[in-house]
Image: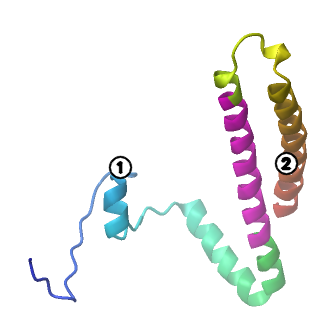
Amino acid sequence: MLEIEKDFRLYITSKLANPKFLPEVFIRVSIVNFTVTEDGLEDQLLAELIGKIMPEIETKRTFLIVSIAEGENELRRNEDRILDLLSKSTGNILENDDLIANLENSKKTSEAVKKQLVENESAQE
């Protein structure tokens, strides 16, 4: 077994904006992205300022951001579920009651999530 000093740190840099690493690498190391855009930095500084002056507004903004991300994930899951059901379907698609029920349910859910996304994005602005 190789003994390593507990305070040993190895820093590796890359000129790639978004380097690709295997999942095994992500488990064992800390990846820090130092790429900063002017807009991203402005958003971070504004969030810090609002957090200090009006913390309730910053809390609401954070909640909206999380809500928007959850809505987008729900839409993605619905799309994946529909594609999965379509790929597993055999015979006439219109005769598959389970598929039709899931499509209708996914459509209702998608419409509700899209409406919520529009409301959250307009409230965030």
Q: Residue at x 37, y 62 (%)?
A: 26
Find the residue positioned furthest to the left: 2
SS label for mark 1? loop
Identity, as a three-letter code, of the amino acid under mark 1: Lys
Magenta range is 62-84
- Please give the residue where the numbered disc 1 appears in the rendered image: 20
In the image, which disc is placed on residue 113?
2
Work out whether residue 75 or residue 89 is closer to the camera in this orientation and state it: 89
- Is 66 one of the magenta-colored residues? yes
- Amino acid at dot 2: Val
Please tell me how many numbered marks the rendered image carries: 2
- Which of the 4 image quarters holds residue 15? bottom left
Q: Which residue occupies 82% across, 55% down?
A: 121
- Residues 58 and 96: in front is 96
Quick one: label 1, few (<14), some, or many (20+) residues within 10 Å? few
Q: Sort mark 2 into few (<14), some (14-19) or many (20+) by Cα contacts within 10 Å.
A: many
* Residue 21, placed above or below residue 82: below
Q: Is residue 48 above or below residue 40?
A: below
At x 86% / y 24%, what residue is drawn? 97
Question: What colouring style does the render use?
Answer: rainbow
Estimate the spatial distance between the alpha carbons at disc 1 and disc 2, rounded to whole Å. 32 Å
Q: Residue at x 72, y 11 (%)?
A: 91
- Relative side of 39 to 7, left or right: right
Q: Quadrant of the C terminus?
A: bottom right
The image shows residue 16 at horizontal and vertical percentages of: 33, 51
